[in-house]
Amino acid sequence: MFAIDLQHLSKSYGPVQAVQDVSLRVPPGELFGLIGPDGAGKTTLFRIMATLLLPDAGTAAVAGHDTRGGMRAIREVVGYMPGRFSLYPDLTVAENLDFFAALFRTTVRANYELIRDIYEPLAPFRDRRAGALSGGMKQKLALCCALIHKPEVLLLDEPTTGVDAVSRQEFWQVLGQLKARGITIMVSTPYMDEAARCERVALLQEGQVLRVDTPAALQAAYPVPLYAVRATGSLYPLLQSLRAYPATRTVYAFGEEAHLSLLPAATAAATTGTAEADLLGYLARAGHAQVQLRGLTPTIEDTFMELLGARPAATAPTAR
């Protein structure tokens, strides 16, 4: 039995097709990631799995229970942390935790061992209203409330968005501990370093699954050599020049530099060094100064862009 089993799942909102024929299977105990830009369908999938939405077509089963007829059973064994902070801001830390424990007919004391490491930094603020907490503390409290009934499956929709780097690191350490306890975790994230921590990831675009694989396999799947290019001045003129370069295959912005792949003939020439020399000469003639060109190992985001069939563009969509 799979912990999560989605088969040919579709969901639309009027004319907008949010999810299209999605099939995913996650075995028990796996840490699985959903990666995709805004509007890719991640939140819709989470809401279907959490029994907050019904699909238009297909089936969704969580912990062996179908979402259409097993809503009550699923809610007993699933912990759900939505993308937006959804606890009661006027209740204190302790009151929120007690309330969610009561909903599941348990107590904080009964399952405290599961949330101990997450809750202890919050303990000095147990009487502070949840709405007055920092972003990282809100995140910890929301996770405690999602875990208080000791779920089998944990659904986390972009749990670290807007949280500082230290809190993000701590959060993923906690996820590792929860996975070691056998909890199945599905998480969406806009951060590629976090995606690399998952055992497998699904790349989503416009409600469809582009590919499911391990992070290492996705990085290795990039089909041609990839280069990072930067020069003095604004990135946009450099992108414009690279788009106009006859040997360009794909190019897109990536931070302060451009990621560039070349057409097959130019890629073959790269083994002799002529492709790099030709490109540097072209950019110099185009007026770009202090051009730096280096080969790089493709990231998951590079593979995502490749799967999208990216064409030369001034900006790249942000994977979320």
Image (cartoon, rainbow, N blue to C red):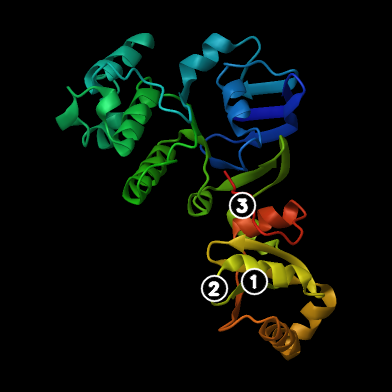
In the structure shown, which secondary structural element does the residue marked by tag 1 occupy?
A: helix
Q: Amino acid at mark 2?
A: Gly
Q: Amino acid at mark 1?
A: Leu
Does residue 141 appear anywhere in the picture? yes
In the structure shown, which secondary structural element does the residue marked by tag 3 occupy?
A: loop
- Viewer-nearest of labels 3 and 2? 2
Q: Residue furthest right?
A: 265
Q: Quadrant of residue 8?
A: top right
- Viewer-nearest of labels 1 and 3? 1
Residue hosting label 2 = 233
Q: Is residue 135 above or below residue 215?
A: above
Residue hosting label 3 = 214
Q: Earlier in the sequence, mark 3 or mark 2?
A: 3
Does residue 1 appear anywhere in the picture? no
Residue at x 62% of width, y 16% of height: 53
Relative depth, front residue between 84 and 51: 84
* Disc 3 to disc 2, C-alpha distance: 37 Å
Residue hosting label 1 = 238
Where is residue 64 shown, x and y percent of the image? 60, 21
Q: Quadrant of the C terminus?
A: top right
In the structure shown, which secondary structural element does the residue marked by tag 2 occupy?
A: loop
Where is residue 153 shown, x and y percent of the image? 50, 28
Mark 3 residue crowding within 10 angstroms, few (<14) / some (14–19) / many (20+): many
Where is residue 310 shown, x and y percent of the image? 74, 56
